[in-house]
Amino acid sequence: MTTLTTHTIESAPEASKALLEKSVGAYGMLPNLHGVLASAPNTLDAYQILHELFLNTSFDAEELTVVWQGINVEHGCNYCVPAHTAIAHSMSVDADLIQALRDEKPMPTAKLQALLDTTLIIVRNRGHISADELANFYAAGYGEQQVLEILLGLSQKVISNYTNHIANTVVDKPFSKFAWEKVAK
């Protein structure tokens, strides 16, 4: 088992301190993931910027959750699935949708299913997607902008999911009630 340092504001490199204070201001606490990322100030900064950029895409709260959780579950991230479960609840996302994503069950609408399917195709095939697969995504009501916005969300999730795998990041207490582990199929 590997671990990386989980910094506090006091123990973090000087260049990360203001970024960690920003995290506390946004979340009312210092998420352990941010404490880990603090060892590399530019990585923490990039993560925070990507998060803000993804929040400001054309996706609504349900769609943001589908992309984030679809990737988190696919990557088997035991930290991000509980964290994004809490985030989804705070964004008033329907509890049945949240649970369906955690359990890898079908989405409640064809449009959300198309978003999840396309996100997972991109993740599983490392960005390769066929013309027919894109046509199905477009037929569901999405366009080129949303394809590129999925990539933005994936960029954020690669940083967090992979960091958590390497660091074995401890799930923060506020998220622990949403603990999750990938079920083998």
Image: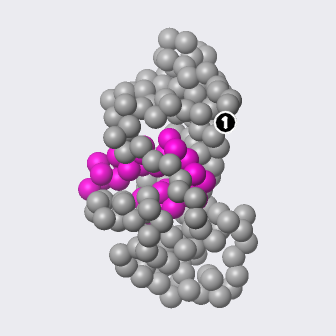
Quarter location, residue 131 = bottom right
Residue at horizontal 48%, vertical 17%?
9
Residue 81 is inside the magenta segment:
yes
| Left or right: where 158 falls relative to 85 | right
Q: Could you tell me the amino acid type at mark 1?
A: Ile
Q: Nearer the viewer, residue 185 or 171?
A: 185
SS assignment for the magenta stretch, majority: helix
Q: Nearer the viewer, residue 112 or 58?
A: 112
Residue 29 is inside the magenta segment:
no
Q: In which quadrant of the rendered image does the C terminus lie?
A: bottom right
Residue at far front of view:
184
Residue at horizontal 48%, vertical 25%?
20
Residue 62: x and y in percent read 37, 64
Residue 106: x and y in percent read 43, 74
Q: Is residue 104 above or below residue 130?
A: above
Reading the image, the residue beneath label 1 is 166
Mark 1, other Cα within 10 Å: few <14 / some 14–19 / many ≥20: few
Q: Is residue 171 above or below residue 61?
A: above
Residue at horizontal 67%, vertical 31%?
1
Q: Determine if residue 19 is in view.
A: no
> In the image, which residues are magenta?
65-92
Q: Is residue 83 above or below residue 136?
A: above
Residue 53: x and y in percent read 50, 51
Q: Is residue 32 above or below residue 139?
A: above
- Kind of element beneath mark 1: helix
